[in-house]
Amino acid sequence: RTDLTSSQVGTKLRTDDKVAQGFGVGRMTVQRFIRLTELIPPILQMVDEGKIALTPAVELSFLKKDEQENLFATMESEEATPSLSQAQRMKNLSQSGRLDMDMIFSIMTE
């Protein structure tokens, strides 16, 4: 036998599909929750407390750890949390290597 991963009978389910079915949610929801494990603990706690919505939090999970720490410091000092569009802009700037503390502050105080 060469393919040890194929199902003997029926369609093989992905693990995230199985988890989604078990909890009665969609596969993408499971993937979003898994993605949240990339957040630093203080930001994840804000998600748990409902201070940051799931979709912006997923976008923030793509920021580097030091960028997340800078963002958290800004959120605390400005008493603000990012909207989805702000989180998306920070993610894009991070991916292009242009997200710094000044840019985070500028985005969070607009």
Image (cartoon, rainbow, N blue to C red):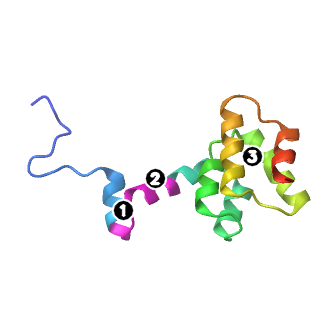
* Kind of residue at disc 1: Ala
Above or below residue 41? Residue 38 is above
Above or below residue 62? Residue 56 is below
* Kind of residue at disc 2: Gln
Judge whether residue 12 is colored magenta: no
* Disc 2 from disc 1: Cα separation: 9 Å
Which residue is the site of mark 1?
20
Q: What residue do we see at 36% from left, 60% from top? A: 19
Mark before the other along the chain sequence, 2 or 1: 1
User: Callout 2 environment at 10 Å: few (<14), some (14 to 19), or many (20+)?
Assistant: some
The quarter of the displayed image where residue 78 is located: bottom right
Which residue is the site of mark 3?
68
Q: Secondary structure at mark 3?
A: helix
Looking at the rendered structure, which numbered label has been put on residue 31?
2
* Kind of residue at disc 3: Gln
Judge from the rendering whether residue 66 lies leftward or rightward of residue 3; answer left or right: right
Q: Disc 3, disc 2: CB below 8 Å?
A: no
Q: Secondary structure at mark 2?
A: helix
